[in-house]
Amino acid sequence: MKKKSRLFTDILIMLGLLGCRLDYVAPQLYRVTYDPNGGSGPVPVDEGVYPKGDFVTILKPKGLINENFVFLSWNTEPDGAGTEYIPGTKAELETDLVLYAVWKEPASTRQFQAQDLTDHHWYEVSAVQLAESEHCLVFADIAEEIPASIAEAIALEYETAIFPVITEAFGDIKDVDHNGKVILLLLDIRDGYTGNGSYFMGYFQPANMSGRNRADMLYLDANPGIPGTREFYASLAHELQHLINFSQTAAKTGASQDIWIDEGLATAAEYLYGGDPNHRKDYYNEDPRESIAYGNNFFVWDGYWEDPVRAGDRYDPAANYATAYLFFQWLRIHAGGNGIYKAIIESPYRDYRAVTSAAARFIDPSLSDWETLLKTWMLANVYNEPAGLFGYHDEIRTVLHHFTQTQGREWNFFPGEGVISDLDENPFNPNPDSNRYIRYVGLSKTAEVSQDFPYTGDYLLTFNANSDCAGNAERGYLAGLGTSRPPVRSAKRTFSSYPIDVRFNPDGSAP
């Protein structure tokens, strides 16, 4: 025991000679404190202590009020002249941080009517105006306690990056309240969202253009939507296109465009504002509910796949947006720009002819035929050729969704739907009682196309060429059936929550 003790003493002596210190120095810890700065009610409390360099989340001023004022932001100086901190953002701590509430006098308060999307009844929203620009007014539901600084950022983004781009591409807005400004109302949209599945990021309600709020306005979600994010702004661009579309069609002639056209142009607005929204093409490629492989696409918007009772596990409204996005990007790419979009809106037609006439003018005369246009786009998703019409000029890559095994299965196709199946046996002779609009195309892996009976190649495209999006399903035949598909090229993701849109008739009623 004595020997061990001597050894330990020798080690301590050696460390001392080498200049080593054994004292423990506790790290300096910092706190974040919130000051109401004239406000009353519960003040946010951060009970944490943080070492230097840690990032902390700036708290929301929930319940903190200041009569006749609205919360703008937190600031390191009581007069707002210091460093600004927005609730929900991260701050790196270098010392103790004291944040003062900065208050702003609101321009006005107003009662709005909004619609509960679960049962379509109307309810009152008490809102405060938080920001204004040349072409918009930003109001927020008082209950949401949205900082005015976020509203000001939204107004700035709308003025500089959304309004000029979207109006140039799609046209002017009908100014029903004669103030030259669109009202942007931020609120928690009542859509039944419980943390899983689809939710409404925003909506345009035509009833406001002639009654109700008597204003050209948009509703934008504040939960689970996050005001001021790129997704939020893309949704704002999407909804602004709906407002413009209504202004240019139904408001002028009483007839609105087919849903698939209006929604396709709205997905194009997302692209024109912020570039490629990857979640649209990712959803197509990953097809998480396998409805796209079964033929689901944009043409029949409120049909079988959008009915949770009939579609069951393959209920998939998000697939409409994914396929519409791809179709309208294909139009833009081959038209050499977005001029084709305004041509579609300005068309005297409100159905597929608005698209085919624009495609014939901007891309190729053969595309004046809906069957040819639909088939060409479907083949673009199969071949992804870098040039020509059977691809996206390498701007977008799509995954081949197809069925395998089991020869000659019949299938009900709604208008516009198409399915790829494997041609395991050549030639393929479909049952002769196929219906009026069912078409077949034999495909090879080298992009050769066999459009004559009997059909040969590596794959078979079966599709419904009916140009009436309200038409009935018709029976066609597949060369194979199954659910196996080639591996997805991107990492598989879980789309547990995804934004969708809500549609209303021109009179404001639910479809």
Image (tube, rainbow, N blue to C red):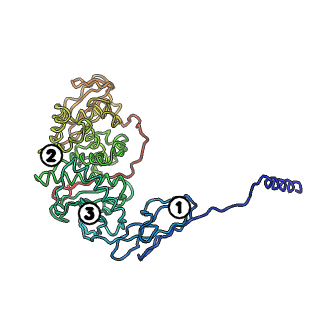
Distance CA(mark 3)–CA(mark 2): 28 Å
Q: Earlier in the sequence, mark 1 or mark 3?
A: 1
Residue in the image at 20% along x and 38% along y: 474
Q: Are marks 3 and 2 in contact (CB under 8 Å)?
A: no
Mark nearer the viewer, 1 or 2: 1
**Horizontal relation, residue 183 to residue 10: left or right:** left
Q: Position of residue 475 (x, y in %)?
A: 22, 36
- In the rendered image, the quadrant that contains the C terminus is bottom left
- Please identify the quarter of the rendering in which residue 390 is found: top left
Q: Position of residue 456 (x, y in %)?
A: 28, 23
Residue type at the position of mark 3: Leu
Q: Nearer the viewer, residue 16 or 174?
A: 16
Q: Which mark is residue 346?
A: 2
Q: Position of residue 482 (x, y in %)?
A: 35, 35
Residue in the image at 27% along x and 48% along y: 269
- Please identify the quarter of the rendering in which residue 54 is found: bottom right
SS at mark 2 in the image? helix
Q: Are marks 1 and 3 in contact (CB under 8 Å)?
A: no
Q: Nearer the viewer, residue 167 or 477?
A: 167
Q: Which mark is residue 93?
A: 1
Residue tagged by mark 3?
137
Residue type at the position of mark 2: Glu
